[in-house]
């Protein structure tokens, strides 16, 4: 057997460069890196030598550069991914939140935090966490609960098994998620005689699970018996590449389709069977057909509480749930009739079994909802000094085209965009599985790297911008252009509304309601401009539309700031969401909210 002598880090980098995705391109497109004493000498040396065979990019924050990698994988429909390496201690722990984002959203990312010395000779090293009762524990054990696969590399030959296991997880449609390989810093630099065969190029296919015969028969029987079925389209439709099959199946059989946050844009917004967004941030049309449905067909969805209205949305007492998912855990939720299968394969099978079956559907609610969203997005009267977030979205919508990808993550924007944005196919990217503030700007960078032809527009509030904005400087440095629209409502407007909606007094959410000596006066234009972005302030909706037109074709990120009213949200649509209200309070408003909460719980149990 021929061997080649390399350090463990060099061998890992060489192996990663040889792994191809299903399209024949490198599966790990490159590595985001912030170097420190735990990875600069080992992994850093290996990456520098690799050059363009495995590109390295420098971020400004460990969490946000991982968000960029996660957004890239989502935009690539999980066909490609990125890796992220950090030092030990705080650098590694900054990745934990991002690992949770990838875990919840079932997205592949390879995390390579440095670890302590396997030899333990210099213990405790700088930034080492010492567990008084367990000598095997390091800070990286925090990744265990937010990784689909976790391994600690304490010998150079460990990568011979750990790396293939990592790729098996990242390319498995059911197990897909973050992988953490905690790489002891001394082991990174240790040499080993690796078999040359280990570095032979490999293409990793992504399987399409076929349905079990008995499960499929039961699913078809349920479909045939249904009088009012509805399809809840989730992210699994997009990752399966089943958009065309969904459109064809819905059209052929007259079944209405509603979209989750992850599934929005799987079906063109103007498709006759697209009844729009569902659930808490959903529209009246989608929620009406779900309330009446006797068969809820979950297609690649994990049935998050925002989708189901905390399981109070589906009101038909005769209802059944049929869940089609590649992950058995998701397929079996809440007593659903399970069909463990790829979405595209399942739709093809359903189509063959239901050739002559077509349901009648009333398109009236869909038309009414389109009118309601148009009203919400309409430009305000000239006397409206502060536009609503919906009116800001309307301006962005009017500037959008078929190549526009709208994206966001937390606060007001996910709810408003899910409700009222008319998405072109593939034109909606929302991180709402973990609803992670700070994903937005880093995510926009990742989307643009995955889809350079797209017109990427990132929408976020001032709160999210302040939480994580440093990858704007990275995008400027790399020459990756996208548009950022910051709605400045002077605080956490979304949670302020929730606080008041549950009877609470405005407190610690808007900046004026937080403990302070000096009033807040943040110049977001100056801040973004200081990082090299083109930054402007739009005085009103008309000015915003003009700036959006001017941003097209820019060679760097463009940041547009507009003040917005923190109080209103789109009244049309929506659904109850379970947020526990205190049983005891000195505030009459809280007691009144508690009474409504208890009534809603009774209604859910009795439905």
Image: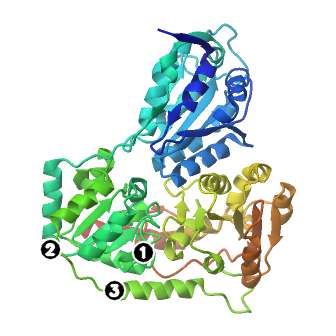
**Secondary element type, mark 2:** loop
**Residue 232 shows in this picture:** no
On the image, the x and y values in percent for residue 409 come to 58, 59
Q: Which residue is drawn at 62% across and 36% down?
A: 84
**Residue 122 shows in this picture:** yes
Measure the alpha-carbon separation of dots 1 and 3: 12 Å
Dividing the picture into quadrants, the one containing residue 247 is bottom left
On the image, the x and y values in percent for residue 59 come to 72, 42
**Secondary element type, mark 1:** strand
**Secondary element type, mark 3:** loop
On the image, the x and y values in percent for residue 541 come to 72, 82
Measure the alpha-carbon separation of dots 1 and 2: 26 Å
Measure the alpha-carbon separation of dots 2 and 3: 21 Å
The earlier-in-sequence mark between 2 and 3 is 2
Above or below, 596 against 118 in this view is: below
The earlier-in-sequence mark between 1 and 2 is 1
Label 1 sits on residue: 276
Above or below, 188 against 55 in this view is: above
Horizontally, residue 455 falls left or right of residue 307, namely: right
Q: Residue at x 77, y 59 (%)?
A: 556
Task: Choose between 578 and 141: the one closer to the eye.
Answer: 141
Label 2 sits on residue: 356
Horizontally, residue 27 falls left or right of residue 120, namely: left
Image quarter in which the C terminus is found: bottom left
Q: Which residue is drawn at 18% across and 66% down?
A: 223
Q: Residues within 10 Å of mark 3 (few under 14, many from 20)?
A: some
> What label sits on residue 363 in the rendered view?
3
User: Nearer the observer, disc 1 or disc 2?
Assistant: 2
């Amino acid at each position: 057997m021929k061997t080649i002598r390399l350090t463990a880090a060099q061998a890992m980098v060489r192996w990663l460069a040889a792994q191809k995705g299903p399209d024949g391109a490198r599966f790990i497109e490159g590595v985001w890196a912030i170097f420190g004493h735990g990875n600069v000498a080992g992994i850093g040396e290996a990456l520098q030598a690799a050059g363009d065979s495995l590109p390295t990019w420098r971020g400004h924050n460990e969490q946000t550069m991982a968000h960029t990698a996660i957004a890239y994988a989502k935009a690539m429909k999980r066909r490609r991914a990125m890796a992220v390496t950090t030092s030990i201690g705080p650098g590694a722990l900054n990745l934990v939140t991002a690992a949770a984002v990838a875990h919840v959203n079932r997205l592949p990312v390879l995390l390579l935090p440095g670890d302590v010395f396997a030899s333990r000779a210099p213990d405790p090293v700088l930034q080492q966490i010492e567990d008084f009762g367990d000598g095997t524990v390091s800070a990286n054990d925090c990744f265990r609960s937010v990784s689909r696969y976790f391994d600690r590399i304490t010998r150079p030959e460990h990568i011979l098994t750990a790396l293939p296991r990592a790729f098996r997880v990242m390319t498995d449609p059911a197990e897909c998620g973050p992988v953490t390989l905690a790489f002891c810093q001394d082991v990174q630099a240790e040499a080993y005689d690796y078999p040359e065969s280990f570095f032979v190029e490999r293409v990793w296919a992504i399987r399409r699970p076929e349905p079990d015969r008995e499960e499929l028969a039961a699913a078809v029987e349920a479909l045939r018996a249904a009088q009012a079925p509805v399809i809840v389209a989730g992210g699994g439709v997009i990752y399966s590449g089943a958009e065309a099959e969904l459109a064809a199946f819905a059209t052929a059989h007259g079944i209405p389709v509603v979209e989750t946050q992850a599934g929005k844009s799987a079906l063109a917004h103007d498709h006759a069977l697209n009844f729009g967004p569902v659930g808490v941030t959903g529209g009246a049309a989608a929620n009406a057909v779900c309330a009446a449905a006797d068969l809820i067909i979950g297609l690649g969805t994990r049935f998050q509480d925002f989708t189901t209205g905390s399981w109070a949305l589906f009101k038909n007492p005769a209802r059944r749930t049929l869940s089609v998912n590649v992950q058995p855990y998701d397929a079996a939720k809440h007593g659903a009739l399970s069909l463990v299968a790829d979405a595209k394969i399942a739709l093809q099978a359903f189509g063959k079994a239901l050739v002559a079956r077509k349901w009648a559907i009333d398109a009236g609610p869909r038309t009414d909802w389109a009118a309601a969203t148009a009203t919400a997005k309409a430009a305000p009267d000239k006397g409206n000094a502060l536009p609503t977030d919906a009116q800001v979205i309307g301006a962005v919508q009017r500037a959008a085209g078929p190549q526009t990808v709208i994206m966001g993550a937390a606060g007001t924007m996910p709810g408003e965009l899910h409700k009222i944005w008319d998405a072109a196919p593939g034109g909606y990217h929302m991180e709402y599985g973990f609803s992670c503030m700070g994903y937005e700007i880093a995510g926009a960078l990742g989307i643009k790297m995955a889809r350079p032809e797209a017109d990427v527009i990132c929408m976020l509030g001032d709160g999210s911008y302040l939480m994580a904005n440093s990858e704007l400087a990275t995008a400027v440095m790399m020459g990756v252009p996208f548009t950022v629209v910051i709605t400045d409502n002077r605080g956490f407007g979304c949670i302020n509304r929730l606080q008041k909606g549950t009877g609470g007094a405005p407190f610690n959410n808007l900046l004026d309601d937080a403990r302070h000596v000096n009033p807040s006066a943040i110049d977001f234009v100056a801040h973004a401009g200081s990082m090299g972005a083109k930054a402007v302030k739009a005085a009103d909706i008309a000015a915003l539309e003009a700036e959006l037109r001017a941003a097209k074709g820019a060679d760097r990120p463009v940041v547009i700031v507009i003040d917005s009213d923190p109080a209103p949200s789109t009244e049309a649509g929506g659904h109850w969401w379970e947020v526990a209200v205190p049983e005891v309070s000195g505030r009459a408003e809280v007691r009144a909210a508690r009474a409504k909460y208890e009534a809603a719980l009774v209604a859910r149990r009795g439905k």
